[in-house]
Image (cartoon, helix red, strand yellow):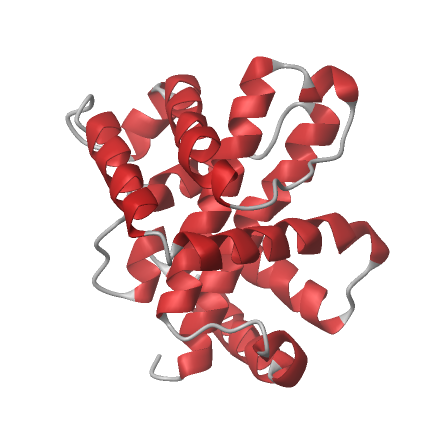
Amino acid sequence: MNNKYHHIAIALAGATQSAILVPQLANTGVCSAILYEQAIKSVFKTSPKTTDDVYDGIENVKTGLQTLIQLLSSGQKEQVQIIRYIFGTLSITSKLLKNNDALDKIDQRLRRISGLYSEMNDETVSANVDDLSYSLAGIYSDIISPISTKIKVTGKIEFLQNSLVQAKVRTALLGCVRSAILWYQVGGSRFQFIFCRKRICNAAQQLLDQINRAS
């Protein structure tokens, strides 16, 4: 996996996979538990050795890769919201990366939260998902949201007014930001959406083929 675009595709798939959760939550009040818990775990992976370490392997962004290929190749109308959430978090993240004070505060808060648990593994996340949602939502609201224009989340009012749904939406957006940070670190640029769309799409398809062969 030496191709630069493989790393870019993995990070974008991570952001896409978290972005998928936002309209699910806003329109139904629930979302895929597996993808949501994956987003939470990625937020705590602050010192990964490789790109796919953030997700514990590329197989854990399979849904993100599939959706990313759809977005890049067709851009169907029903996926406009997902695209908006991805671009919104990429924009916020570009400002966040220039704000060392905010990055330090996020790191401190994440250390404090993870310090409450013996180990941040699958079992811990699954058993404490609501508490973690409120804690991570606090990071998004207190530190990330004030940095830039707020991302407008659209959906059904009865779900958007529910405090746990609100927390989960913010946590999903924090998952997007985590992947967006990775995307910038591996050489991601917004110009690539215009000039390198096919390369990213091909890289995502190659990664998907690799996952399918392994399974």
Q: Nearer the viewer, residue 183 or 75?
A: 183
Q: Residue at x 57, y 15 (%)?
A: 163
Relative to the observer, which residue lies in front, 21 or 181? Answer: 181
Tell me the quarter of the picture where residue 29 sits: top right
User: What percent of the width, then of the height, locates residue 13?
Assistant: 52, 60
Q: Nearer the viewer, residue 210 or 1?
A: 1
Res 136 seen here: yes
Q: Is residue 44 above or below residue 77?
A: above
Q: Residue at x 20, y 63 (%)?
A: 49
Q: Quadrant of residue 121?
A: top left
Which part of the image, by quadrant, shows the C terminus? bottom left
- Asked if residue 62 can be seen in this view, the reply is no
Give the left or right position of residue 62, taking residue 186 as reference: right
On the rendered structure, is 101 left or right of 10? left
- Judge whether 139 appears above or below 185 on screen: above
Q: Position of residue 172 (x, y in %)?
A: 52, 38
Q: Residue 134: horizontal and vertical position, in percent?
A: 43, 21
| Quarter of the rendering occupied by the N terminus | bottom left
Q: Residue at x 53, y 27 (%)?
A: 168
